[in-house]
Every structure is written in C-alpha cells, then in structure tokens.
Image (cartoon, rainbow, N blue to C red):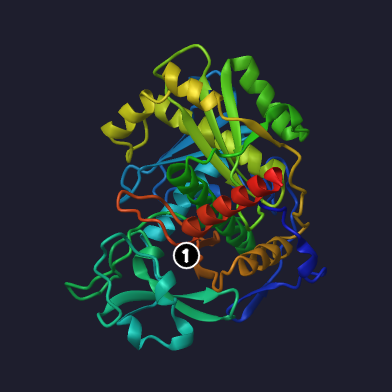
Amino acid sequence: MADSVSPDTVHPEFPGIRLGDTVHRAAKRFFLGTHRTATPEETLARISPHFARCGITRLADVTGLDRLGIHTVIGHRPNSPTLSGSAGKGFSLAAATVSAAMEAIEFHHAEHLRLPHVEAAWNDLPADGRIPLDRLPGTKHGSFRPDRPEIWTWGWDLMSGRPVAAPWTSVGLHSMPPGTKPGARSFYAMGTNGLASGNHILEAVAAGLYEVIERDSVACWRYAGDRLNWPTPRVDLASIDAPSVRDLLHRFELAGIRPLLFDVTTDMGVPSYMAIVYDRELRKTGMNRGYGSHLEPAVAMCRALTEAVQSRLVLIAGSRDDFFRRDLVRNQNADGSAEIAALEATPINTDGRRHRNHATPTFEGDVAILLTVLHRAGIEQALVFDLTLPEIGIPVVRVLVPGLEGYQFDFYTPGARPLAFAEALKAHASQAQMGSVA
C-alpha cells in the first residue's frame, strides 16, 4: 500500500537540526546492522565508567542459552524503581553489550528526570506551546479535562522550532516531579516509547523517531488485522539480497528456528518490519516477535529479526520482571500446530527489495527526511526532550510525536491513525475489486 520514502522534498545539503539555541550535525561511521557515529568498542569504552552511577551491576552474555548464536546480553539494575532488567542484541558481543547497557542508561535517565515543569490547566498553556486536544495522548476513560491542572514539562518541537509542553509522565518514568505538592496529577500512562540514547544527541533523536514510527506502524497494521481480518503483507525471504539479513536467515536455518518477516510499512513509507520466530521441532516454546523501522530497509529487517531473538532469549533466561504469568501462558501456548498453520497460511506476497535505501551519511540528513515524511502524513509536531545528565554526559532523549499511535496497553483504544489506515485499506481493496470487474 505504502510507497517508499522519497527524499526529493528535502534540501539535498541537509542543514543541521536545531534543538533550542544549538544546531547539531553528526556524521555516521559505523554501518553493520545499524548506523552509529562510533564503533561498538569505542562506545563501550566511553560508557563503561558510568555503569555504577546508573545502577548497572552486571551485563550477562546469555547468547549460549539458545542455539542461534546471535549475540544477546542482559543488563541488571537490582535497585531500579522500574525495570531491573534490560536487554541488547547485535552482530558482535560488543554491540550487544552496548545495546543492553544503553537501554539501562536510558531507564536511569528517565527515572531521574530533571526537566522544568509546570502545574497548569491545558487551557492556561500558551496556544503555540501545547499539544492540540485531539492529539493529546492519554488512556481510555481517562480523567483529563482541559480546565483542570496537570503536570507538564517542556520539550523542543523540531517542526515549529519552539518549546511545547507535554504531560510529565509521557516523558519520565516516575510519577511526579520532585517537590510537587501532594495530590498533583498526571493523566498519561507511562511507557518507554521514544526513549533513546546515542553517541551523539542526533543519533539519539533519530533512534527515538524510528521507535515511535515503528510503534505506530505496528499498531496500524494490528488494528487492520483485528478490525478487517486483513492479512499483514508477508515478505518472500528468498527475495532478500542484503548480506546482513541473509547472514541472519542462514543462522536461523542452521539452528532449526523458523523466521517469518512481515512488512508493516504504512502511508509514511518508512520501511518497517515485524518478525515472528518459532522452533521448528519443539512445541510450547512460544512465538517471539521483534520490530524494526529504518530508512535503510536492511537495518529495519535486522532490527526486527534480532529483536525477536532477544525476546526469545530473555524468556529463556527468565529475567523479564514485567512479564507476568498471563504473558508466559499466552506465549507458551502461541506455537501450537493450529496457530502455526494459521500463521504459515499467510500469503507470501511482498518482495524483500520493495523499499529503496534512503538513509543518508549523516544523522541530520536522516532526521530531516523523517520530519518530512511525518509532515506529509499530517503530523504537525515532533517533540524532543533532552534527558542528558551533565555528570554522565551520555546523550539521552525522549521523542514524542503527537498523532502517532503508541503502545497497546490494557486500556488502549484506537486513535485516529489506525482508524484512517483501516479505512484506506478498505478503499484500496474496493478500488482494486472494481478495477478487476471492469
């Protein structure tokens, strides 16, 4: 349905990205399965001195608990007020270690938010410094009222170039700012969508943008499947020619693990994929999912496939402290013969070379393209909150894009985008049917 991203509407020189009073630029230097400004080894050397301050007591290589050989590492923060375990994956042990450590570092920063805040009603916020009511994120049956005080914090809107307020709990991972009077409220359900880090702040911003686009893409296709019984486009694995992805698929084949790859790209055109993996021989081992979005399709595929492996290993290791009994039972019962047959019956109808690579040599280039495609999709704000703690110096941000769909929590209700996406699929199918009749 979606066309590939076209960068033609973006200035070819890709000027720097302004955050507040500073214009940032960052060239890429590492490209194996991801894009970074430094190698994993360089990053690991720079962040290691800060592990203790961030509460990281152990980074465990759990790759050998499975038979795939795709590097996976679990980080432990036993005194964390939120999740005590983080996870990372990569094409090397150093890359997986950095991935797990950076996720733990992100959590630490979000748990110790130091941004300025204000207690005010939405009605009293500046008209050009607030999220429109119809795009204000919240929860089903929430108690928000525009005339009632809430806790807000300030971020930078990359599109308008001005500060914009967002709910405190949409940014941090603790309920109220320090010093807030008892009884203060914040109506937004906390999560980690858009929480990202990097060697450079633009690397972190790009990672955050990719994650919110990925979550939106997954939510739109999931709603279309639930509402319309519409099959998610399945990728012909034999058509994939990217060496990094072929390497991963070869490892799956040798290990007897079955990977399926689905193209969940939406109208934005940013290549997005969902991977589902299951054991070919053993039942009751579950089905594990992974997701990825990136301007380079091969990177998006690698992220989806390796995240599915990471999910599998986290469960094998038994270290996920937000995975409850209902989740374990649901996952263990997901790979029955009937479930596998239904999954495998999904038509293979999508070429793995469908999307062109529109990634640029710089992060300012990638961010500029992502902002352009968001704007074309009707998105008017892209907020960045700089969570970086000066005493640590590792760039951490929270990216919030009002109007994009987020996590599907227990109290989730579909927003405007999945509703419109499903209607567009129906219209597309009707036009195709009329064309075939004619």
Residue 56, placed above or below residue 336: below
Q: Mark 1 = which residue?
A: 389
Closest to the observer: 412 or 207? 412
Task: Name the residue at 65% across, 68% down.
Answer: 376
Residue 269, placed above or below residue 375: above
Residue 67, placed above or below residue 121: above
Closest to the observer: 223 or 40? 223
Residue 91, visible in the rendered structure: no
Picture quadrant of residue 71: top right
- Please state the horizontal and vertical placement of residue 181, each as a whole percent of the image: 20, 76
- Please state the horizontal and vertical placement of residue 147, each as a whole percent of the image: 27, 83
Picture quadrant of residue 233: top right
Q: Is 297 on the left or on the right of 185, as rendered?
A: right
- Please state the horizontal and vertical placement of residue 185, each as a whole percent of the image: 24, 71
Task: Name the residue at 34% across, 30% down.
Answer: 330
What amino acid type should be assigned to the residue bearing mark 1? Leu
- Please state the horizontal and vertical placement of residue 231, each as a whole percent of the image: 54, 38
Task: Name the residue at 45% across, 56% down.
Answer: 406
Closest to the observer: 100 or 437? 437
- Mark 1 crowdedness (10 Å alpha carbons): few <14, some 14-19, many ≥20: some
